[in-house]
Image (spheres, coloured by chain):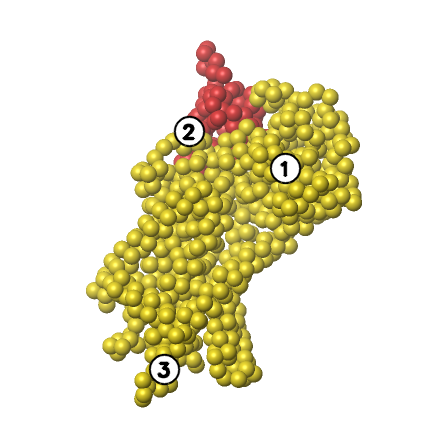
Chain colours: A red, B yellow
Amino acid sequence: MTSRIDGDDTESLADLPPGATGEVESVDETGPLGRRLLDLGFTPRTPVRVVRRAPLGDPVVYELRGTRLCLRRSEAHRVRVRRS
Amino acid sequence: MSADAAALPGVLRLGLVGSPNSGKTTLFNALTGLRARVGNYPGVTVERREGTCRLGGRNVVMVDLPGAYSLDPVSPDEEVIGRVLDGELGAAPDALVMVADACSLERSLLVLGQLLARGAPACLVVTMLDELHARGGRLDLERLERALGVPVLGVVGHRGIGLGALRETLARPESWSRPPVPPPTPALERAAWADSVAHTVLSERPGVHRLTEFADRIVLHPLAGSLLFIAVMVAFFQLIFAWAQPAMNAIDAGVGLAAGGVRSVVPAGLFADFLADGLIAGVGAVVIFLPQIVLLFSLLYLLEDLGYMARAAFLVDRVMSRAGLDGRSFVSLLSSYACAVPGIMAARSIPSPRNRLVTILVAPLMTCSARLPVYALLIGAFVPAATVWGPIGLQGLVLLGLYLLGALSALCAAAVLKRTLLRGDTLPFYMELPSYRVPPLRLVAGQVWGSTAAFLRRAGTIILLVSVVLWVLLTFPRVAPPAGVEGADARRFALEHSLAGRAGHALEPVIAPLGFDWKIGVGLLASLAAREVIVSTLAQIYAATDEETSLRSAVRADVGPDGKRVFTPATVASLLVFFVFALQCVSTLAVMRQETGSWRWPAFAFGSLLALAWTASFVTYHLVSALT
């Protein structure tokens, strides 16, 4: 899966500031990381909210499907989202 | 429990599967009555555990599988599940019980979808229904059963609600319905299937967990959260040190009474010496630290079950990543504060094999509870009980300093290992922050009891055995003192000429540069069995030298042949530093071997930490000698 070539309305989850919400568009990775992100619930059209960054800037807590998960920037970077 | 029960014909084997924090372990405990460890931290269930119970007149073996977000393995934990289901690790389960948190249903359905695709009989147990309702969620279990085609049951594990119906269902997997068509296999299609099932059965989705949202605003706040983190850690050590004191004094008095009582009943002689100086002194010197260990485990489990540990891991992830590790190593290393054995086993939840090995190798540097008796003895005897500020005392600060030194050197060692021997890429980092839950106190108490009992079992076997063996080594051969040598001097003479005394003397050339005399040498030899043994050894050495005084005042007053104090500030500092670094624990070496599969890594850890300990003690001794 890749992000839409003409889609300039999607951005990386890692670029969303704390407090922002969006919807998952796709996961840009087909390896173990990509499969695990899907297992964790980062499937298309899932609403996601950026809760907070760690004091030292990384990782970041996200809220999706009623649970809180934290990902490092390098992992969140693989998730394309559409900001709402 | 165990493979024997599994091998019996006619015994039903049920495998418990569920994602971390699904309430799986609580359910396992409720069904089997076993006090297994239940945590609120993702990945706490790292070992495969079995428990037996009788359900509907049948003997059932419950196999508690590690928590998993998927059957498509990323971590060693998840790999275990596939191998158990395939029957590669003992007999395969006859049927599978999927445990799902009602508040994150879709995620569990993804795993259930994978289970159903394998074709084994399965049923779904939905937990946390009370939390779902509290958050305004509505779940139709009957509709879920129809949608999935397998039995669905709702329970509130820790309150025992729904367990009766569950037991009846679990006893008869032959009668479980099977889905007419298994769920789709491709990941995205399976995700869509899980979403559509969840959409059908959840008439109301759960709202945010208000307590979690509110608490996280403070706990995860850059300033408030960091301050809270530091406060929690400082309080942790202050409480362990100050609160345990009255109970320790009481035990101290009790052990003295017991030894005196034995001596008043048993006729004086070798046997009375054995009972009072061997058995009672040896066990007493360990039992006295139970209050501290109970406090330590209580706080550790409480913080874990509350959900704070995952937050702490989140806060320190960046620091851990500097050392090439991640926040999950933090929990393994923090558990090593209690004991490196569970800490090393907790490292199984670290997905990256390299990070896992590095965590295992540096875990022994974390200040385990077995070092506490040693630190407590030396700090209690040689650091003044002065107040520094408010309730903070000098003794507590020195203890905190030793804990920090251990943690800091663990991180440095990890960073060095990741840059040299164990270079390589890391696996993705993800971690769930579970909802805050006030754990039932009974649950915490059960966990504390389990861990304390484990410590006591060690105290009762290894330490007692070593104590008795040492008493023998300290007593035999019985060399008669020359004429004119009497009383305490005669006892010291006998001790110096015993097997242990000779071994300690033989060690002196190696340990004299560290400021240690032969008595400390005997203690160090004995502490190879377990660190805390040095305390019971010293207790024995000093009880044999001077029966009436307590160990603390005995080590304080001890004078060498040259008339100088044995325990100078430099010697005490050097000994403390030696204990920070040296890997003197047979149990840790054994569990390292179990986890890494060979003696190679335990031997490497033992050798390099011994060299580090010797060097650091040498430097400390000469530095403090020069300064004082």
Q: Identify the residue at the far top of this view.
A: A6
- CA gap, disc 3 and disc 2: 73 Å
Q: What residue type is labelled 2?
A: Ser
Front-most of residues B257 and B479? B479
Taking the spot 54% from the left edge, 42% from the top edge, the residue there is B46
Q: Nearer the viewer, mark 1 or mark 3?
A: 3
Front-most of residues B385 and A37? A37
Question: Do callouts 1 and 2 mark residues in contact (Cβ within 8 Å)?
Answer: no
Task: Please report whichever mark, 1 or 3, sits nearer to the chain's N-terminal start.
Answer: 1
Label 2: few (<14), some (14–19) or many (≥20) C-alpha neighbours in 10 Å: few
Front-most of residues B118 and B158? B118
- CA gap, disc 1 and disc 2: 40 Å
Q: What residue type is labelled 3?
A: Ala
Residue B113: horizontal and vertical position, in percent? 64, 26
The residue beneath circle 3 is: B480
Taking the spot 70% from the left edge, 20% from the top edge, the residue there is B181
Quadrant position of residue B551: bottom left
Residue B548: horizontal and vertical position, in percent? 43, 81
Q: What residue type is labelled 1?
A: Ala
Would you place residue A5 above or below residue B460 in this image?
above
Residue B29: horizontal and vertical position, in percent? 65, 47
The residue beneath circle 1 is: B91
Label at residue A74 = 2
Taking the spot 60% from the left edge, 31% from the top edge, the residue there is B86
Residue B337: horizontal and vertical position, in percent? 45, 53
- CA gap, disc 1 and disc 3: 63 Å
Q: Can residue B427 be seen in this view?
A: yes
